[in-house]
Image (cartoon, rainbow, N blue to C red):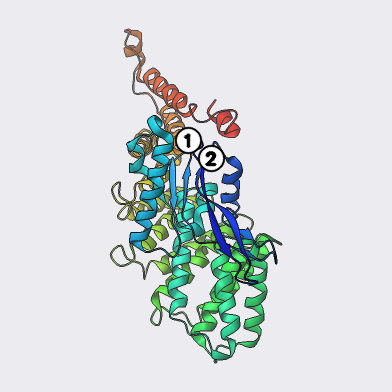
């Protein structure tokens, strides 16, 4: 019996009025139909072309993905315009169909780990994981919040609406970025700050985001353009006037300089990234903007860790740890388990590379962080992050200095060095359950 499920639906072309039938997939078993999963990743699974005029449309339908051997095993993506109650009903209906299809292989335990992913970031979730999807969704929500109260000047209303549509599409479809770039630049050639300073600043910020996301052309040049437009936006996005917009643009600048550091002036650009994240954190608080607060501190911690390889190693690594600790105010095992585990792994990596005379103590702290992450990451819930954490835990056990004296070893007592090496082997063997030559050859070679 097929697990994947499609519904034959009558569609009406909004352009020519032609009525035609379409096969709308609502449950996809990735193992059974990898071709359909590929369409989900390409964001074309619910895109249909009119047989008469070839106009494309995408009906707003829910989607359930079943992925045996992956984490999360079940992903639910609701209709975008559905209410909270409607989304719950959609999930219940599709899960019931999946349960009936799987019959005796179904486990109610899976219901504890169903991931609900908004459609605009579903492809990012599949390609890059939940953290990237969460960050992208926050950007989309910030955009909606920032533009909802921005009044488009009447003379530019048509163009402005088109830019808004393209900006939303660009969040999950990079192919529209060149068109969006062209329209933003054309609009800003005619619109002046005097006509509408708030809208002008919003367009400058959007243009910065477009250059930041752009894959065409020279990466460093694009990042330089992004930085220039973010700086222009800050002429009118001030902390006293629009604090959240100010903070959002500061975060954008931090990200741009962090990316730029990968190709030029590494230390200088990382220091600039730190300054901008710190500016954002003069606005974000754990009470009023907890997700932005935690994300900014987590990003700041990764920048300090990178800067530690350029200068003041110990000081910058300690600053990175302080930032990750701040993120953990929000990222708790109960409220944000995956982010909590990721932050624990970030801290473990910092402790692992921390120099100085407290090597053993730092390695023990790295081991503690890995174990806390493994309280969340299990083979069933997140096999690949579980494997990565086990591999890092193994490295820490191998590096752990021995406390056993030569006399103790000579007396026949097994040294703690041998015990730690055995623990490391156990960790590597756990990692190799999922780091296979066929699926993850690079990671397999690293662990093997």
> Helix or strand or loop: what does disc 2 sit on?
loop
Q: Position of residue 346 (x, y in %)?
A: 42, 45
Q: Which quadrant would the C terminus be assigned to in this image?
A: top right
With 192 as the anchor, is 402 left or right in this view? left
Q: Position of residue 427 (x, y in %)?
A: 42, 26
Question: Does dot 1 land on a helix, a strand or a loop?
Answer: loop
Residue located beneath label 2 in the image: 30
Residue 105: image location, x then y, percent? 40, 30
- With respect to residue 114, does 198 lie above or below? below
Depth order, front residue of 239/17: 17
Which percent across, then down, holds residue 397? 41, 28
The residue that label 1 is drawn on is 68
- Residue at position x 33%, y 60% from top? 85
Q: Report the side of 164 relative to 341 (left or right).
A: right
Closer to the N terminus: mark 1 or mark 2? 2
For disc 2, the neighbor class at 10 Å (few under 14, some 14 to 19, many from 20) is: some
Residue 282 lies in quadrant: bottom left
Query: In the rendered image of this protein, does residue 214 appear above or below residue 95?
Result: below
- Is there a contact, CB below 8 Å, between mark 1 and mark 2? yes
- In the displayed structure image, the side of residue 192 where residue 396 appears, left or right: left
Left or right: where does residue 134 sit relative to residue 48?
left
Query: Where is residue 149, by image quadrant?
Result: bottom left
Mark 1 closeness class: few <14, some 14–19, many ≥20 residues within 10 Å: few
In the rendered image, the vertical position of residue 124 relative to residue 286, given as above or below: above
Residue 443 lies, with reference to residue 132, above or below; the image says: above
Question: Does residue 365 appear in the picture of this structure?
Answer: no
Task: Give the Cα separation between the discs numbered 1 and 2.
Answer: 8 Å
Give the label on residue 37, or none: none
In the rendered picture of this protein, how many numbered marks are placed on residues? 2
């Amino acid at each position: 019996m097929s697990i994947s499920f499609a519904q034959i639906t009558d569609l009406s072309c909004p352009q020519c009025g032609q009525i035609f039938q379409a096969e709308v997939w609502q449950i996809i078993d990735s193992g059974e139909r990898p071709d359909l999963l590929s369409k989900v990743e390409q964001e074309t699974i619910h895109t249909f072309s009119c047989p008469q005029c070839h106009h494309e449309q995408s009906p707003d339908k829910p989607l359930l993905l079943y992925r045996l051997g992956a984490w999360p095993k079940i992903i639910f993506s609701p209709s975008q315009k559905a209410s909270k109650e409607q989304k719950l009903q959609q999930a219940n209906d599709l899960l019931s169909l999946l349960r009936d299809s799987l019959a005796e292989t179904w486990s109610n335990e899976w219901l504890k780990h169903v991931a609900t992913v908004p459609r605009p970031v579903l492809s990012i979730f599949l390609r890059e994981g939940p953290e990237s999807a969460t960050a992208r969704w926050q950007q989309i929500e910030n955009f909606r919040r920032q533009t909802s109260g921005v009044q488009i000047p009447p003379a530019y209303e048509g163009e402005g609406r088109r830019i808004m549509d393209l900006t939303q599409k660009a969040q999950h479809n990079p192919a529209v970025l060149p068109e969006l770039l062209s329209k933003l630049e054309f609009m800003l050639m005619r619109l002046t700050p005097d006509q509408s300073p708030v809208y002008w600043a919003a367009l400058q910020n959007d243009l910065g985001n477009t250059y930041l996301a752009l894959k065409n052309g020279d990466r460093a040049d694009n990042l330089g353009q992004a930085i220039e437009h973010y700086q222009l936006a800050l002429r009118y996005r001030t902390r006293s006037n629009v604090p959240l917009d100010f903070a959002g643009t500061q975060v954008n600048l931090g990200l741009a300089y962090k990316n730029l550091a990968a190709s030029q002036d590494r230390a200088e650009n990382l220091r600039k990234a730190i300054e901008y994240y710190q500016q954002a954190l003069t606005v974000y608080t754990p009470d009023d903007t907890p997700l932005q607060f935690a994300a900014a501190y987590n990003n700041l911690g990764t920048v300090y860790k990178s800067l530690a390889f350029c200068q003041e190693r110990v000081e910058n690594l300690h600053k990175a740890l302080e930032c990750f600790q701040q993120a953990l105010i929000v990222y708790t095992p109960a409220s944000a388990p995956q982010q909590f585990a990721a932050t624990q792994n970030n801290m473990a990596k910092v402790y692992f590379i921390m120099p100085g005379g407290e090597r053993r103590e730092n390695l023990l702290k790295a081991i503690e962080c890995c174990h806390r992450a493994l309280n969340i990451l299990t083979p069933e819930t997140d096999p690949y992050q579980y494997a990565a954490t086990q591999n890092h835990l193994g490295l820490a056990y191998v590096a752990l200095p021995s406390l056993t004296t030569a006399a103790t070893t000579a007396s026949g007592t097994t040294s703690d060095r041998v015990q730690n090496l055995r623990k490391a082997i156990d960790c590597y063997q756990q990692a190799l359950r999922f780091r296979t030559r066929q699926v993850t050859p690079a990671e397999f070679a690293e662990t093997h």
